Amino acid sequence: MDRRSRLRRLAGVGTRFLIVGGISTLIEVGAFNLFVYAFGWDLVVAKVGASLVALINAYFGNREWAFRHRDRRGRVAEIVLFLGVNLVCTLLGAGLVWLGAEAVEVLTGHAPGPALVNIVNLGSIAVIVVVRFLLYHYVVFRHAPKAAPSDVSA
């Protein structure tokens, strides 16, 4: 496969990945608001619950659509890798938000307001989207290694 074909295929996978992520984000925000305002859940519990609901969509959307052309490994192994990647990305995102808020406080001399916090959060989301895509692409939904051509002597 030539370079142009690989880039075109990668762009297609990336686009589908972003669409699944956008839908998962809408599901998470909707579930969070439902849990908090309709059911009266605690904010942290609602955030965890909403994230889990969105994660189900993200797994199936990525497995069955964005990375559908990829080889399949055992479902349990794939889910464990998927959850592990999402745990790492969640921790990385939280760390980036913390680091960004600390940097703003050091630079300005006071705690960041809502606008700066949201800017930092959006920056962390942008970084995490790239990291998550790479980990899905190369770890969770990877291609199986190509078998070496057999040596046939005639």
Image: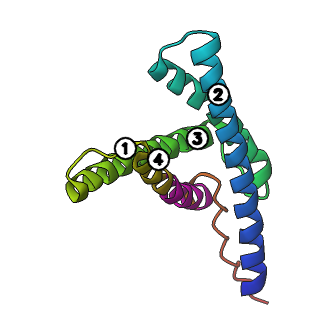
User: Which residue does the numbered mark 2 point to in the structure image?
Assistant: 53
Q: Report the disc number at residue 77.
A: 3
Quarter of the figure that contains the C terminus: bottom right
Q: Amino acid at mark 3?
A: Ala
| Gap in angstroms between the C-alphas marked 4 and 1 | 9 Å
Question: In the image, 123: left or right of 133?
Answer: left
Instruction: State which mark lies toward you, 2 or 1.
Output: 1
The residue lying toward the viewer, choosing from 139 and 134, is 134
Which secondary structure class fits the magenta region best?
helix
CB contact under 8 Å: marks 4 and 1? no
Q: Is residue 2 visible?
A: no
- Residue type at mark 2 is Val
Disc 3: CA contacts within 10 A as few (<14), some (14-19) or many (>=20) = few
Q: Viewer-nearest of labels 3 and 4?
A: 4
**To which quarter of the image does residue 74 belong?**
top right
How far separated are the C-alphas under marks 3 and 4? Answer: 35 Å
N-term-proximal mark, 4 vs 2:
2
Label 3, label 2: how far apart the Cα atoms are: 20 Å
Q: Which mark is residue 113?
A: 1
The image shows residue 93 at horizontal and vertical percentages of: 43, 48
- Whichever of callouts 4 and 1 sits on the residue coming sooner in the sequence is 1
Q: Nearer the viewer, mark 4 or mark 2?
A: 4
Mark 2–mark 1 distance (CA, rounded to whole Å): 30 Å
Q: Which residues are magenta?
A: 125-137
Q: Residue at x 45, y 42 (%)?
A: 90
Question: Which of the marked residues, 1 or 3, is nearer the chain's N terminus?
Answer: 3
In the rendering, at what x and y percent does residue 96 appear?
37, 51
Q: Position of residue 125 (x, y in %)?
A: 51, 52
Foreground: 97 or 113? 113
